[in-house]
Amino acid sequence: MAADPDVLPGRHPGWPARPGPLRVRAGRVGLRPPRLRDASAWSELRLQDREYLQRWEPTTFGDWHERNALLAWPAQWSALRGLGRRGQALPFVITVDGRLAGQLTVGNIVRGALRSAWIGYWVTAGLAGGGVATAAVALAVDHCFGPAGLHRLEATVRPENGPSLRVLEKSGFRREGLFERYLDVEGAWRDHFVYGLTAEDVPCGAVHALVRAGRAERV
């Protein structure tokens, strides 16, 4: 297989990588490292899905259009690429039938005795309910507990975000508590449920559990 020109070989477990694919209702779901040439597709999805995405994402400086415009992607891509190369994160784009459909990031990777990280994701509104996010999370879980050598993953989700809560629960995550006033989202401090998952919770893998439940098919 030819080398990806936008990804240099890493020195850290599990990176770079291309987990998947899995087939769900929406199509063939896979993960891959972000590319500089993703700018157009990424910006188009982010701008068209502003109302769908903005209510769940942390408050940041600047206008939504400026932060998600075509010219904003190179800086984001460079930052994500740097985190991956330094072993601090596993940044992926989510693809459906080969087309960019969202992002998934495993961040704040801590090695040593902890071997933990958090996981976050978004999928375009047009594919909501098609099993894409669930398949992407399952692929990431198995990659983290396999080639990446991690032991624990965490995720935080607002209690009002029912679809995202179901994604985590289908992937084996358990609710561990409530973080009160945890993140500034849309200009206010919002409570978030914290979910956790360790390698022992999915001994046969999250993908295996998803396939066994009839929610996905291996390709």
Image (cartoon, helix red, strand yellow):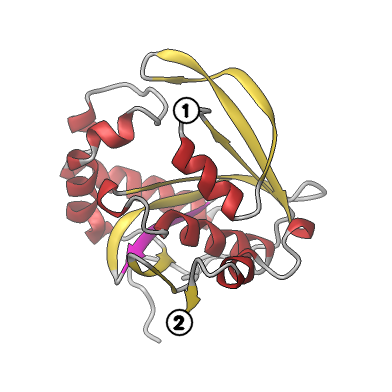
Query: How many discs appear?
Result: 2
Which residue has dot 2 on it?
Answer: 219
Kindly report the secondary structure that dominates the magenta region of the rendered protein: strand
Which residue has dot 1 on it?
Answer: 160
State how far apart marks 2 and 1 are (Cα).
34 Å
Q: Which residue occupies 47% across, 37% down?
A: 162
Residue 147 in the figure: left or right of residue 130: right
Query: What amino acid type should be assigned to the residue bearing mark 2?
Result: Val
Residue extending furthest right?
Answer: 113
User: Hey, which quadrant is residue 14 in on the image?
Assistant: bottom right
Can the viewer see residue 34? Answer: yes
The front one of 26 and 53 is 26
Query: What amino acid type should be assigned to the residue bearing mark 1?
Result: Glu
Between label 2 and label 1, give the one nearer the viewer: 1
User: Hey, which quadrant is residue 130 in on the image?
Assistant: bottom left
In the image, residue 181 lies at what x, y percent?
56, 15
Q: Is residue 24 magenta?
A: no
User: Hey, which quadrant is residue 199 in on the image?
Assistant: bottom right
- Dot 2 or dot 1: first in sequence order is 1
Residue extending furthest front?
Answer: 214
The front one of 79 and 138 is 138
Q: Which residue occupies 68% across, 62% down?
A: 145
The front one of 147 and 24 is 24
Mark 2 nearby-residue class (10 Å; few <14, some 14–19, many ≥20): few
Q: Which residue occupies 44% across, 74% down?
A: 21
Vertical comparison of 191 with 199: above or below:
above
- Region rendered in magenta: 90-96
Determine the secondary structure under disc 2. loop
